[in-house]
Protein backbone atom coordinates (compact mmCIF):
# COMPACT_ATOMS: atom_id res chain seq x y z
CA UNK A 1 0.00 0.00 0.00
CA UNK A 2 2.84 2.39 0.75
CA UNK A 3 3.01 5.39 3.07
CA UNK A 4 0.82 8.45 2.61
CA UNK A 5 3.14 11.43 2.20
CA UNK A 6 0.87 14.12 0.79
CA UNK A 7 -2.85 14.80 0.60
CA UNK A 8 -4.30 16.58 -2.40
CA UNK A 9 -7.36 16.55 -4.63
CA UNK A 10 -7.91 15.15 -8.12
CA UNK A 11 -10.81 14.08 -10.33
CA UNK A 12 -12.52 10.82 -11.06
CA UNK A 13 -11.14 9.78 -14.47
CA UNK A 14 -14.62 8.66 -15.57
CA UNK A 15 -16.99 11.41 -14.41
CA UNK A 16 -14.38 14.15 -13.75
CA UNK A 17 -15.90 14.97 -10.37
CA UNK A 18 -13.57 16.54 -7.82
CA UNK A 19 -12.44 13.92 -5.26
CA UNK A 20 -9.79 13.57 -2.53
CA UNK A 21 -6.49 11.99 -3.50
CA UNK A 22 -3.22 11.06 -1.86
CA UNK A 23 0.38 10.50 -2.88
CA UNK A 24 1.87 7.31 -1.45
CA UNK A 25 5.54 6.36 -1.27
CA UNK A 26 6.32 2.75 -2.14
CA UNK A 27 9.56 0.75 -2.11
CA UNK A 28 12.41 2.29 -4.10
CA UNK A 29 11.05 5.82 -3.83
CA UNK A 30 8.18 5.20 -6.24
CA UNK A 31 5.27 7.63 -5.78
CA UNK A 32 1.72 6.57 -6.63
CA UNK A 33 -1.45 8.66 -6.65
CA UNK A 34 -4.49 6.89 -5.22
CA UNK A 35 -8.08 8.13 -5.22
CA UNK A 36 -11.61 6.79 -4.94
CA UNK A 37 -14.91 7.81 -6.53
CA UNK A 38 -18.11 6.72 -4.79
CA UNK A 39 -19.70 5.85 -8.14
CA UNK A 40 -16.79 4.56 -10.23
CA UNK A 41 -14.43 2.95 -7.73
CA UNK A 42 -10.75 3.17 -6.86
CA UNK A 43 -7.89 4.31 -9.09
CA UNK A 44 -4.12 4.48 -8.84
CA UNK A 45 -1.42 5.74 -11.16
CA UNK A 46 2.38 6.11 -10.85
CA UNK A 47 3.58 9.73 -10.83
CA UNK A 48 7.27 9.26 -9.89
CA UNK A 49 9.54 6.22 -10.24
CA UNK A 50 12.27 7.06 -7.73
CA UNK A 51 15.00 7.98 -10.22
CA UNK A 52 15.49 11.18 -8.19
CA UNK A 53 14.56 11.94 -4.60
CA UNK A 54 10.97 13.19 -4.68
CA UNK A 55 11.23 15.36 -1.57
CA UNK A 56 14.38 17.12 -2.82
CA UNK A 57 12.73 17.83 -6.17
CA UNK A 58 9.68 19.42 -4.49
CA UNK A 59 11.82 22.37 -3.27
CA UNK A 60 9.79 22.49 -0.03
CA UNK A 61 6.60 23.30 -1.96
CA UNK A 62 3.73 23.26 0.55
CA UNK A 63 0.87 20.81 -0.02
CA UNK A 64 -2.60 21.88 -1.09
CA UNK A 65 -4.47 23.27 1.96
CA UNK A 66 -7.43 21.12 2.96
CA UNK A 67 -9.94 23.90 2.30
CA UNK A 68 -8.61 24.71 -1.19
CA UNK A 69 -9.22 23.21 -4.63
CA UNK A 70 -12.68 21.90 -3.82
CA UNK A 71 -14.27 23.21 -7.06
CA UNK A 72 -11.39 22.66 -9.49
CA UNK A 73 -11.36 22.13 -12.37
CA UNK A 74 -15.06 22.14 -13.19
CA UNK A 75 -15.45 25.87 -12.50
CA UNK A 76 -11.95 26.59 -13.69
CA UNK A 77 -10.46 29.91 -14.64
CA UNK A 78 -7.77 31.95 -12.98
CA UNK A 79 -9.73 32.28 -9.72
CA UNK A 80 -8.56 33.89 -6.44
CA UNK A 81 -7.24 30.47 -5.29
CA UNK A 82 -4.87 30.31 -8.26
CA UNK A 83 -1.36 31.05 -7.03
CA UNK A 84 0.34 32.51 -10.09
CA UNK A 85 -0.43 34.56 -13.20
CA UNK A 86 0.10 33.86 -16.89
CA UNK A 87 3.60 33.27 -18.21
CA UNK A 88 2.41 31.86 -21.54
CA UNK A 89 -1.09 31.98 -23.02
CA UNK A 90 -2.15 29.66 -25.83
CA UNK A 91 -4.65 30.89 -28.42
CA UNK A 92 -6.21 28.35 -30.78
CA UNK A 93 -6.48 30.00 -34.19
CA UNK A 94 -7.93 27.05 -36.13
CA UNK A 95 -9.20 23.48 -35.71
CA UNK A 96 -7.96 22.52 -39.18
CA UNK A 97 -4.86 20.37 -39.53
CA UNK A 98 -2.95 18.60 -42.30
CA UNK A 99 -2.07 15.70 -39.99
CA UNK A 100 -4.18 13.41 -37.83
CA UNK A 101 -1.75 12.40 -35.11
CA UNK A 102 -2.44 9.49 -32.77
CA UNK A 103 -1.81 11.84 -29.84
CA UNK A 104 -3.33 15.33 -30.08
CA UNK A 105 -4.56 17.35 -27.09
CA UNK A 106 -6.65 19.60 -29.38
CA UNK A 107 -8.09 16.85 -31.62
CA UNK A 108 -6.69 18.69 -34.63
CA UNK A 109 -8.28 17.97 -37.99
CA UNK A 110 -11.61 16.84 -36.58
CA UNK A 111 -13.27 20.13 -37.51
CA UNK A 112 -12.92 22.77 -40.21
CA UNK A 113 -14.08 25.48 -37.82
CA UNK A 114 -11.93 28.48 -37.10
CA UNK A 115 -12.55 32.00 -35.77
CA UNK A 116 -12.40 35.01 -38.04
CA UNK A 117 -9.40 37.32 -37.93
CA UNK A 118 -11.50 40.00 -36.23
CA UNK A 119 -12.56 37.50 -33.55
CA UNK A 120 -8.93 36.55 -32.96
CA UNK A 121 -7.91 40.19 -32.67
CA UNK A 122 -10.58 40.71 -30.04
CA UNK A 123 -9.32 37.61 -28.22
CA UNK A 124 -5.80 39.06 -28.22
CA UNK A 125 -7.11 42.33 -26.77
CA UNK A 126 -8.91 40.33 -24.07
CA UNK A 127 -5.77 38.33 -23.25
CA UNK A 128 -3.76 41.54 -22.85
CA UNK A 129 -6.48 43.01 -20.61
CA UNK A 130 -6.54 39.93 -18.40
CA UNK A 131 -2.90 38.84 -18.44
CA UNK A 132 -0.79 41.89 -19.25
CA UNK A 133 2.13 40.86 -21.45
CA UNK A 134 2.33 37.05 -21.66
CA UNK A 135 4.29 35.09 -24.22
CA UNK A 136 1.47 34.41 -26.68
CA UNK A 137 1.40 30.98 -28.35
CA UNK A 138 -0.54 30.69 -31.60
CA UNK A 139 -1.76 27.11 -31.77
CA UNK A 140 -4.42 24.89 -33.26
CA UNK A 141 -5.03 22.54 -35.02
CA UNK A 142 -2.24 23.60 -37.32
CA UNK A 143 -1.99 27.43 -37.27
CA UNK A 144 -0.22 27.63 -40.63
CA UNK A 145 -3.39 26.52 -42.35
CA UNK A 146 -4.40 30.18 -42.05
CA UNK A 147 -3.26 32.49 -44.86
CA UNK A 148 -3.71 35.55 -42.64
CA UNK A 149 -1.45 34.35 -39.82
CA UNK A 150 1.17 37.02 -40.52
CA UNK A 151 -1.45 39.72 -40.03
CA UNK A 152 -2.39 38.19 -36.69
CA UNK A 153 1.28 38.01 -35.59
CA UNK A 154 1.71 41.68 -36.44
CA UNK A 155 -1.43 42.58 -34.50
CA UNK A 156 -0.29 40.61 -31.44
CA UNK A 157 2.86 42.71 -31.26
CA UNK A 158 0.91 45.94 -31.77
CA UNK A 159 -1.53 44.92 -29.01
CA UNK A 160 1.27 44.78 -26.45
CA UNK A 161 2.68 41.22 -26.37
CA UNK A 162 6.48 41.30 -26.42
CA UNK A 163 6.88 37.72 -27.65
CA UNK A 164 4.94 35.61 -30.16
CA UNK A 165 5.42 31.86 -30.54
CA UNK A 166 4.06 29.58 -33.27
CA UNK A 167 3.21 25.98 -32.34
CA UNK A 168 3.47 24.06 -35.62
CA UNK A 169 4.23 20.79 -37.36
CA UNK A 170 6.44 22.77 -39.75
CA UNK A 171 5.05 21.34 -43.00
CA UNK A 172 4.03 24.65 -44.58
CA UNK A 173 7.15 26.43 -43.31
CA UNK A 174 9.25 23.82 -45.09
CA UNK A 175 7.29 23.96 -48.34
CA UNK A 176 6.66 27.71 -48.57
CA UNK A 177 9.64 29.75 -47.47
CA UNK A 178 7.85 32.93 -48.60
CA UNK A 179 5.08 32.18 -46.10
CA UNK A 180 7.68 31.74 -43.35
CA UNK A 181 9.29 35.04 -44.34
CA UNK A 182 5.95 36.81 -44.02
CA UNK A 183 5.72 35.53 -40.45
CA UNK A 184 9.28 36.61 -39.68
CA UNK A 185 8.69 40.07 -41.13
CA UNK A 186 5.52 40.37 -39.03
CA UNK A 187 7.54 39.79 -35.85
CA UNK A 188 7.36 36.04 -35.09
CA UNK A 189 9.95 35.27 -32.39
CA UNK A 190 9.83 31.51 -31.75
CA UNK A 191 8.81 28.39 -33.65
CA UNK A 192 7.77 25.55 -31.35
CA UNK A 193 8.36 22.72 -33.82
CA UNK A 194 6.75 19.30 -33.39
CA UNK A 195 9.86 17.11 -33.66
CA UNK A 196 9.58 13.62 -32.21
CA UNK A 197 12.94 12.11 -33.09
CA UNK A 198 15.69 11.38 -35.56
CA UNK A 199 14.11 8.36 -37.32
CA UNK A 200 11.24 8.32 -39.78
CA UNK A 201 9.73 5.26 -38.11
CA UNK A 202 8.99 7.47 -35.09
CA UNK A 203 6.96 9.88 -37.23
CA UNK A 204 5.17 7.03 -38.94
CA UNK A 205 4.15 5.68 -35.53
CA UNK A 206 3.06 9.00 -34.00
CA UNK A 207 2.13 11.20 -36.99
CA UNK A 208 1.12 8.69 -39.64
CA UNK A 209 3.81 9.49 -42.23
CA UNK A 210 7.58 9.99 -42.63
CA UNK A 211 8.34 13.63 -41.86
CA UNK A 212 11.99 13.84 -40.84
CA UNK A 213 13.23 15.56 -44.02
CA UNK A 214 10.34 18.01 -43.89
CA UNK A 215 11.22 18.89 -40.30
CA UNK A 216 14.87 19.42 -41.19
CA UNK A 217 13.89 21.75 -44.00
CA UNK A 218 11.62 23.73 -41.67
CA UNK A 219 14.57 24.21 -39.30
CA UNK A 220 16.77 25.42 -42.15
CA UNK A 221 14.12 27.89 -43.33
CA UNK A 222 13.65 29.29 -39.82
CA UNK A 223 17.41 29.43 -39.30
CA UNK A 224 17.86 31.48 -42.46
CA UNK A 225 15.18 33.87 -41.20
CA UNK A 226 16.70 34.01 -37.70
CA UNK A 227 13.56 32.70 -36.03
CA UNK A 228 14.45 30.72 -32.91
CA UNK A 229 13.43 27.04 -33.11
CA UNK A 230 12.63 24.82 -30.13
CA UNK A 231 12.15 21.13 -30.90
CA UNK A 232 9.11 19.59 -29.20
CA UNK A 233 9.05 15.79 -28.98
CA UNK A 234 6.10 13.88 -27.55
CA UNK A 235 7.89 11.04 -25.77
CA UNK A 236 6.09 7.70 -25.84
CA UNK A 237 7.49 4.61 -24.16
CA UNK A 238 8.58 2.03 -26.73
CA UNK A 239 8.39 4.50 -29.62
CA UNK A 240 11.05 7.18 -29.10
CA UNK A 241 12.26 6.97 -25.49
CA UNK A 242 15.44 5.35 -26.86
CA UNK A 243 16.11 8.31 -29.20
CA UNK A 244 16.60 11.10 -26.65
CA UNK A 245 20.38 11.18 -26.83
CA UNK A 246 20.35 11.16 -30.63
CA UNK A 247 17.82 13.98 -30.61
CA UNK A 248 20.04 16.09 -28.36
CA UNK A 249 23.06 15.47 -30.57
CA UNK A 250 20.98 16.48 -33.60
CA UNK A 251 19.94 19.69 -31.86
CA UNK A 252 23.58 20.51 -31.15
CA UNK A 253 24.44 19.98 -34.82
CA UNK A 254 21.60 22.32 -35.84
CA UNK A 255 22.59 25.07 -33.41
CA UNK A 256 22.23 28.06 -33.45
CA UNK A 257 19.05 27.62 -35.52
CA UNK A 258 17.83 25.23 -32.82
CA UNK A 259 17.84 26.90 -29.42
CA UNK A 260 16.43 24.11 -27.28
CA UNK A 261 14.36 20.95 -26.85
CA UNK A 262 11.11 20.94 -24.88
CA UNK A 263 10.24 17.33 -24.03
CA UNK A 264 6.62 16.36 -23.42
CA UNK A 265 6.14 12.92 -21.85
CA UNK A 266 2.91 11.58 -23.32
CA UNK A 267 -0.31 12.38 -21.46
CA UNK A 268 -3.69 10.97 -22.27
CA UNK A 269 -6.15 13.72 -23.17
CA UNK A 270 -7.79 14.87 -26.38
CA UNK A 271 -7.17 12.20 -29.02
CA UNK A 272 -5.19 9.17 -27.88
CA UNK A 273 -5.07 5.57 -29.11
CA UNK A 274 -6.44 3.78 -26.05
CA UNK A 275 -6.78 3.72 -22.27
CA UNK A 276 -3.27 3.61 -20.79
CA UNK A 277 -1.99 1.13 -18.23
CA UNK A 278 0.71 1.77 -15.65
CA UNK A 279 3.26 0.36 -18.10
CA UNK A 280 2.42 3.17 -20.55
CA UNK A 281 3.18 5.95 -18.06
CA UNK A 282 6.45 7.80 -18.58
CA UNK A 283 7.17 9.97 -15.57
CA UNK A 284 9.24 13.13 -15.37
CA UNK A 285 12.03 11.51 -13.37
CA UNK A 286 12.24 8.61 -15.84
CA UNK A 287 12.65 11.13 -18.65
CA UNK A 288 15.49 12.89 -16.82
CA UNK A 289 17.22 9.59 -16.07
CA UNK A 290 16.99 8.44 -19.71
CA UNK A 291 18.29 11.78 -21.04
CA UNK A 292 21.14 11.67 -18.55
CA UNK A 293 22.18 8.19 -19.61
CA UNK A 294 21.75 8.60 -23.38
CA UNK A 295 23.29 12.09 -23.67
CA UNK A 296 25.94 11.49 -21.00
CA UNK A 297 25.04 14.53 -18.95
CA UNK A 298 24.64 14.59 -15.15
CA UNK A 299 21.12 14.16 -13.87
CA UNK A 300 21.94 16.86 -11.32
CA UNK A 301 22.04 19.43 -14.17
CA UNK A 302 18.23 19.41 -14.30
CA UNK A 303 16.40 21.94 -12.15
CA UNK A 304 12.71 22.06 -11.14
CA UNK A 305 10.56 25.05 -11.96
CA UNK A 306 10.20 27.81 -9.35
CA UNK A 307 7.27 29.30 -11.25
CA UNK A 308 5.04 26.32 -11.95
CA UNK A 309 4.84 23.37 -9.58
CA UNK A 310 8.18 21.46 -9.48
CA UNK A 311 6.53 18.23 -10.65
CA UNK A 312 5.29 19.97 -13.81
CA UNK A 313 8.68 20.08 -15.51
CA UNK A 314 12.39 20.78 -15.55
CA UNK A 315 14.88 23.08 -17.26
CA UNK A 316 18.64 22.90 -17.80
CA UNK A 317 21.21 24.99 -19.67
CA UNK A 318 24.39 23.87 -21.45
CA UNK A 319 27.24 25.15 -23.56
CA UNK A 320 27.73 23.12 -26.73
CA UNK A 321 31.24 21.66 -26.80
CA UNK A 322 32.90 19.44 -29.46
CA UNK A 323 32.60 16.42 -27.16
CA UNK A 324 29.10 17.08 -25.81
CA UNK A 325 27.27 19.43 -23.47
CA UNK A 326 28.83 21.39 -20.60
CA UNK A 327 26.23 21.93 -17.84
CA UNK A 328 25.56 25.47 -16.68
CA UNK A 329 22.81 24.54 -14.25
CA UNK A 330 22.49 22.31 -11.19
CA UNK A 331 19.70 21.25 -8.87
CA UNK A 332 22.00 22.30 -6.01
CA UNK A 333 21.49 25.90 -7.21
CA UNK A 334 17.70 25.66 -7.12
CA UNK A 335 16.06 27.92 -4.58
CA UNK A 336 12.94 26.97 -2.61
CA UNK A 337 11.73 30.56 -3.04
CA UNK A 338 9.04 30.90 -5.68
CA UNK A 339 9.55 32.80 -8.91
CA UNK A 340 6.98 34.85 -10.76
CA UNK A 341 5.42 34.50 -14.19
CA UNK A 342 7.27 37.55 -15.52
CA UNK A 343 10.67 36.07 -14.66
CA UNK A 344 9.66 32.76 -16.22
CA UNK A 345 8.46 34.46 -19.42
CA UNK A 346 11.75 36.32 -19.79
CA UNK A 347 13.70 33.12 -19.18
CA UNK A 348 11.74 31.31 -21.87
CA UNK A 349 12.10 34.13 -24.38
CA UNK A 350 15.81 34.60 -23.69
CA UNK A 351 16.62 30.94 -24.26
CA UNK A 352 14.27 30.17 -27.17
CA UNK A 353 14.72 33.29 -29.31
CA UNK A 354 17.64 33.92 -31.66
CA UNK A 355 20.02 36.66 -30.55
CA UNK A 356 21.05 39.40 -32.98
CA UNK A 357 24.14 38.70 -35.05
CA UNK A 358 27.41 39.87 -33.52
CA UNK A 359 31.14 39.18 -34.02
CA UNK A 360 32.61 36.47 -31.84
CA UNK A 361 35.18 37.76 -29.31
CA UNK A 362 38.65 36.33 -29.75
CA UNK A 363 39.96 36.72 -26.21
CA UNK A 364 41.05 33.54 -24.41
CA UNK A 365 43.24 33.51 -21.31
CA UNK A 366 45.14 30.39 -20.22
CA UNK A 367 42.78 28.23 -22.22
CA UNK A 368 39.69 29.66 -20.52
CA UNK A 369 37.03 32.00 -21.87
CA UNK A 370 36.94 35.59 -20.79
CA UNK A 371 33.56 36.99 -19.74
CA UNK A 372 32.70 38.51 -23.13
CA UNK A 373 33.37 35.19 -24.87
CA UNK A 374 31.27 33.34 -22.29
CA UNK A 375 28.34 35.71 -22.85
CA UNK A 376 28.67 35.33 -26.62
CA UNK A 377 28.64 31.54 -26.33
CA UNK A 378 25.68 31.68 -23.99
CA UNK A 379 23.74 33.61 -26.65
CA UNK A 380 24.89 31.65 -29.71
CA UNK A 381 26.46 28.30 -28.70
CA UNK A 382 24.18 27.03 -25.97
CA UNK A 383 21.26 24.62 -25.70
CA UNK A 384 18.34 24.62 -23.29
CA UNK A 385 16.62 21.37 -22.34
CA UNK A 386 13.21 21.61 -20.69
CA UNK A 387 10.08 19.53 -20.23
CA UNK A 388 6.41 19.82 -19.38
CA UNK A 389 4.67 16.76 -17.93
CA UNK A 390 1.04 17.50 -18.72
CA UNK A 391 -1.68 15.95 -16.57
CA UNK A 392 -4.63 13.87 -17.63
CA UNK A 393 -7.72 12.61 -15.81
CA UNK A 394 -5.82 9.77 -14.12
CA UNK A 395 -2.92 11.76 -12.65
CA UNK A 396 -4.42 15.26 -12.34
CA UNK A 397 -3.15 16.84 -9.13
CA UNK A 398 -4.99 20.02 -8.19
CA UNK A 399 -2.01 21.12 -6.10
CA UNK A 400 -0.12 21.32 -9.40
CA UNK A 401 -3.04 22.95 -11.20
CA UNK A 402 -3.03 25.84 -8.71
CA UNK A 403 0.53 26.75 -9.73
CA UNK A 404 0.08 26.49 -13.49
CA UNK A 405 1.38 29.47 -15.50
CA UNK A 406 0.65 27.96 -18.95
CA UNK A 407 -2.87 29.08 -19.75
CA UNK A 408 -5.33 28.72 -22.61
CA UNK A 409 -7.74 31.42 -23.77
CA UNK A 410 -11.16 29.77 -24.01
CA UNK A 411 -14.24 31.80 -24.83
CA UNK A 412 -13.24 34.84 -22.81
CA UNK A 413 -11.76 32.86 -19.90
CA UNK A 414 -8.10 32.09 -19.24
CA UNK A 415 -7.72 28.50 -17.98
CA UNK A 416 -4.82 26.28 -16.91
CA UNK A 417 -3.75 24.13 -19.86
CA UNK A 418 -4.45 20.80 -18.16
CA UNK A 419 -7.92 21.95 -17.09
CA UNK A 420 -8.87 23.10 -20.58
CA UNK A 421 -7.97 19.81 -22.30
CA UNK A 422 -9.02 17.37 -19.57
CA UNK A 423 -10.65 14.32 -21.17
CA UNK A 424 -12.59 11.54 -19.34
CA UNK A 425 -11.69 7.87 -19.72
CA UNK A 426 -14.68 5.83 -20.81
Image (cartoon, grey):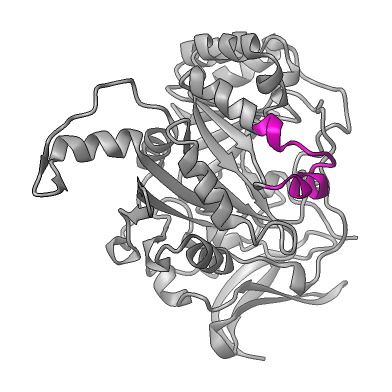
Q: Which residues are magenta?
A: 199-215
378 left or right, relative to 154: left
Image height of 81 relative to 189, above or below: below
Residue 402 place in picture, x, y as percent = 54, 54
Q: Where does residue 161 sit, x and y in percent of width and height?
A: 46, 21
Inspect this view and state whether residue 357 appears: yes
Which quadrant does the C terminus fall into? bottom right
In-image side of 365 versus 26 (left or right) = left
303 relative to 351, above or below: below
Q: Is residue 146 left or right of residue 51?
A: right
Camera sees residue 404 = no
For the N terminus, which image quadrant?
bottom right
Quarter of the image where one finds residue 191: top right
**In-front residue for pair 56/281:** 281
Image quarter of residue 358: top left
Percent coordinates x, y for residue 354 in the rendering: 41, 27
Residue at the extreme right: 426
Q: Residue at x 78, y 49 (%)?
A: 201
Q: Depth check: 418 or 38 in front?
A: 418
Task: Indicate whether 267 appears above or below 141.
Answer: below
| Most common SS among magenta residues | helix
Q: Is residue 142 left or right of residue 264?
A: right
> Which residue appears at 76% of the width and 24% of the height?
94
* Quadrant in the rendering for residue 380: top left
Asked whether 207 falls inside the magenta stretch, the response is yes
Amino acid sequence: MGTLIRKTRSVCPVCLQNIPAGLFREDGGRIVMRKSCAEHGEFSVPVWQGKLDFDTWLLKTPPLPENKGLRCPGNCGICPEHEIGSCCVLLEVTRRCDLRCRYCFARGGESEEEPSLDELKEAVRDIVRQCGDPLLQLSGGEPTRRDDLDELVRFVKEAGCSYVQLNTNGIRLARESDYAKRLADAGLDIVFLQFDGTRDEIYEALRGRPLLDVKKTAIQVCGDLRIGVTLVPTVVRGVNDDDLGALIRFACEMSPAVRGIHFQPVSYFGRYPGKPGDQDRYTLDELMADISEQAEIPITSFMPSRCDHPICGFHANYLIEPDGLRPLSSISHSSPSRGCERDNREYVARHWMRSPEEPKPASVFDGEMDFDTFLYRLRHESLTLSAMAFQDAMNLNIERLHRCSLHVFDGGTVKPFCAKYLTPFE
